[in-house]
Image (spheres, grey):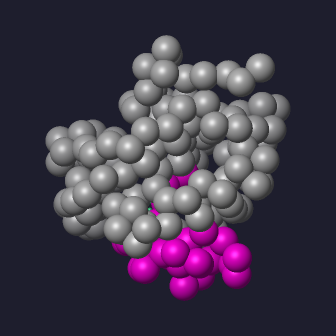
Amino acid sequence: MIEKTLAIIKPDAVKKNVIGEIIGMITKAGFRILGMKYTRINKEQAGSFYEVHKERPFYNDLVDYMSSGPIVPIALEKENAIEDYRKLIGSTDPAQAEEGTVRKLYGESKSYNAVHGSDSVENGIIEIGFFFSKSELVLCD
Ligand code: UDP
Ligand code: MG
């Protein structure tokens, strides 16, 4: 099934100057870019994006981190996108991530782990809608 997922290049990876490297890994893996922007979110927006984690001990730090600098949200499409993208980025904790994955290569820690990825088809659609209006999503053919 063709699925959509939301990637975000997080503030730590933007600061490391590896936006290009990460986009290269994503496109080489066969994902189509539907939309992409260089932007920044405030604490309120970060809090609402990560609402599901509100009760978790790391929530406040996560909100501070995600609003601490520019990010690059990217709407992606591919056959089996949810699973394949999560395989490409590796485990939440870079120390546990497989060799060659985005988080292994560029993540700092379980908190500062370079990229976001949607966890389900349903959330992929919801999360893309958080950053992109319909007219900002473009099909190349
Ligand atoms: N996170 C954290 N500490 C944890 C677990 C998660 O700081 O113990 C942060 C981390 O940035 C992670 C995000 O919260 O990417 C969302 O957590 P989730 O469990 O959804 O991981 P993901 O889906 O990003 O792999
Ligand atoms: Mg998640």
**Does 137 appear above or below 82?**
above
Q: Position of residue 26 (x, y in %)?
A: 67, 54
Residue 9: x percent and y percent?
A: 46, 56
Please tell me which residue is depicted at 72% across the width and 44% down the height of the picture. 31
Residue placed most toward the observer, 35 or 67: 35
The image position of residue 46, as x and y in percent, is 27, 46
Ligand 1: give its quadrant.
bottom left
Quarter the C terminus occupies:
top right
Quarter of image, res 75 = top right
In the rendered image, the vertical position of residue 49 relative to residue 69, given as above or below: above
Left or right of 141 in this view: 121:
left
Question: What residue sits 71% from the left and 24% below the top?
Answer: 140
Quadrant for the N terminus in the image: top right
Q: Nearer the viewer, residue 8 or 138?
A: 138
Residue situated in front as seen by the camera: 33 or 44: 33
User: Which contiguous range is marked in magenta?
Assistant: 93-117
Tell me, yes or no, whether the highlighted magenta stretch contains residue 105.
Answer: yes
Name the residue nearer the viewer: 2 or 100: 100
Q: Is residue 33 visible?
A: yes
Q: Do we see residue 124 in this rendering?
A: no
Q: Is residue 6 magenta?
A: no
Q: How many marks?
A: 0
Measured as percent of width and height from the top left, residue 7 is found at 53, 48
Determine which quarter of the picture holds residue 29.
bottom right
Classify residue 78 as left or right of residue 33.
Answer: right
Residue 89, located in which quarter of the rendered image? bottom right
